[in-house]
Amino acid sequence: MNVPFEITSGPGQSYLMRNVSGQTVDLVTVTVDHPEGLTRDLPSEETFGPGASKKFLVLATWQTGRPVEVLVSWDVHPTPYALPLPPKN
């Protein structure tokens, strides 16, 4: 499948999700199996134009660790697709 997104590691505990396709992608939603209080700014039914990006946080603690993937869905792919989170150094 041609997934229109890539996720790169940002500063601290942030990540950057970018639309790498040449098309606008609508209804982009990201979910993660992680405590809600330890996530910030996950896209929810958002529109990503070509090349558009959004920064979000997935915070790790000693008790929770860091998830290895997020689930992404969008208008033409409503079934969540697992995208790996890059490792943090």
Image: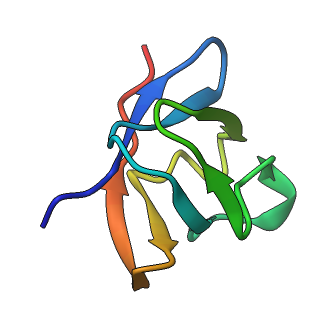
Colouring scheme, one of rainbow, by chain, secondary structure, one colour:
rainbow
- Rendered view: 9 above or below 75: above
**Which of the 4 image quarters holds residue 81?**
bottom left
Depth check, front residue: 33 or 76: 76
Q: How many marks?
A: 0
Q: Is residue 14 left or right of residue 76?
A: right
The residue that appears at 48% across and 74% down in the rendered structure is 73
User: In this rendering, would 72 be left or right of 29?
Assistant: left
In the picture, residue 14 is in which quadrant?
A: top right
| Residue visible at 32% across and 43% down in the picture | 21
Q: Residue at x 34, y 55 (%)?
A: 83
Quarter assignment of residue 22: top left
Against 5, residue 31 (above or below) is below
Whether residue 12 is visible here, answered yes or no, is yes
Give the residue at the far front of this rendering.
23
> Residue at position x 36%, y 32% from top?
86
Q: Nearer the viewer, residue 81 or 28?
A: 28
Position of residue 4 measured from the top left corner of the image (x, y, whole percent): 33, 51
